[in-house]
């Protein structure tokens, strides 16, 4: 009987080792100060805090992966992975301090996975967070050829007294929105269904945008770390929300205290034609659009009225989009 190796079963340990070495080279400088990088676990020293709390988040990029894999563009999806996690951690008031990734695939394609890692490293640079480790799982017979899945994990830290619980949100506080960079990483199952029904391919050119479909769909998720960092020492922030799956209402309500509701004025959100395009194309009802997509607003910050001008001065594309009032805990889109 012929001897069987792990490689015969579809797992190439040599490629895995080569991929790890590639990652080590890419993160040089980015992960300085990381403890035990490349070991069974890794970490960072927590310094400069009196009463630190650790905040954590995990997320993926959903079926946006199918678009990336269909057109063979794999770097921007790595930026998305970092963005979805660091933006979530930001909302707690914490500073992201560590990022980890998980990549699962049937067989390692070095050219593809190197591009994915390039994107993750770029996302970490934009977020100012080190890549402290990760896992690459080879799972032959589980994932078809050319298919991979991603998950990200972010750790943040802040003083316990600076944790944003939403309890300080009061009537009269104002909502300040920050624009999204498009669809971000939500709603892609609906987008793909609409495109399939209409017979539109990812490589088709859209004259109204001067771009191909995949270029619009693979625009990376905006990372809001630098924006929030500008505000932290100068503005009293009462709450922050990352607008992801579930839309404005489904995410903003999560940070409101009992007895307070947010009134969001849709007319104040800068219009992005990409949302009108998919709405018309799929004949999607407005309510469904707002339930599925960020509709051009990727992040919301709640402050007192007297703080608004400071925010506008510090973040040039920020805009007032609503207010807080007494009432049943809810978000009303008007």
Image (cartoon, rainbow, N blue to C red):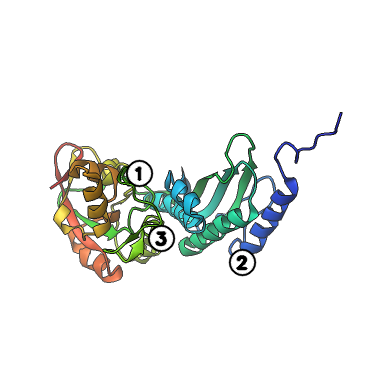
Q: Nearer the viewer, residue 299 or 328?
A: 299
Q: Nearer the viewer, residue 108 or 302?
A: 108
Residue identifier under label 2: 29
Mark 1 → mark 3, Cα distance in angstroms:
35 Å
Disc nearest the viewer among 2 and 1:
1
Residue under the image location 34 percent in, 42 percent down: 193
Compared across the picture, whether 300 is left or right of 87 comes to left
Give SS at disc 2.
Answer: loop
Residue identifier under label 1: 196
Residue under the image location 43 percent in, 54 percent down: 83
Give SS at disc 3.
Answer: helix
Q: Which residue reaches farthest front?
A: 199
Question: Can you see residue 32?
Answer: no
Residue identifier under label 3: 225
Percent across and percent down for residue 125 are 51, 64
Residue under the image location 19 percent in, 56 percent down: 321
Question: Can you see residue 315?
Answer: yes
Q: Which residue reaches farthest top?
A: 1
């Amino acid at each position: 009987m012929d001897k069987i190796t792990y490689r015969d079963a579809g797992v190439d340990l040599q490629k895995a080792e080569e991929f790890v070495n590639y990652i080590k080279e890419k993160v040089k400088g980015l992960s300085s100060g990381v403890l035990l990088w490349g070991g069974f676990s890794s970490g960072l020293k927590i310094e400069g805090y009196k009463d630190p709390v650790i905040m954590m988040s995990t997320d993926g990029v959903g079926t946006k992966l199918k678009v990336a894999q269909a057109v063979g563009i794999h770097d921007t999806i790595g930026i998305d992975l970092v963005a979805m996690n660091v933006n979530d951690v930001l909302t707690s008031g914490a500073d992201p301090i560590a990022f980890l990734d998980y990549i699962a695939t049937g067989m390692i394609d070095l050219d593809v996975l190197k591009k994915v890692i390039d994107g993750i490293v770029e996302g970490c640079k934009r977020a100012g967070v080190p890549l402290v480790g990760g896992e690459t799982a080879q799972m032959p017979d589980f994932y078809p050829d050319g298919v991979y899945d991603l998950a990200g994990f972010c750790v943040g830290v802040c003083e316990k007294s600076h944790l944003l619980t939403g309890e300080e949100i009061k009537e009269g506080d104002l909502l300040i929105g920050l624009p999204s960079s498009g669809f971000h990483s939500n709603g892609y199952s609906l987008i793909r269904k609409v495109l399939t029904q209409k017979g539109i391919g990812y490589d088709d050119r859209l004259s109204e945008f001067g771009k191909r479909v995949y270029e619009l769909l693979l625009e990376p998720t905006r990372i809001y770390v630098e924006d929030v960092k500008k505000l932290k020492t100068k503005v009293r922030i009462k709450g922050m929300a990352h607008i992801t799956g579930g839309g404005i209402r489904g995410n903003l309500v999560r940070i409101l205290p009992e007895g307070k509701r947010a009134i969001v004025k849709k007319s104040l959100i800068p219009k992005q034609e990409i949302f009108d395009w998919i709405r018309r194309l799929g004949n999607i009802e407005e309510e469904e659009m707002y339930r599925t997509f960020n509709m051009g607003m990727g992040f919301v910050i709640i402050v007192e009225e007297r703080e608004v001008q400071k925010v506008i001065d510090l973040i040039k594309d920020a805009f007032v989009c609503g207010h807080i009032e007494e009432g049943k805990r809810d978000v009303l889109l008007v």
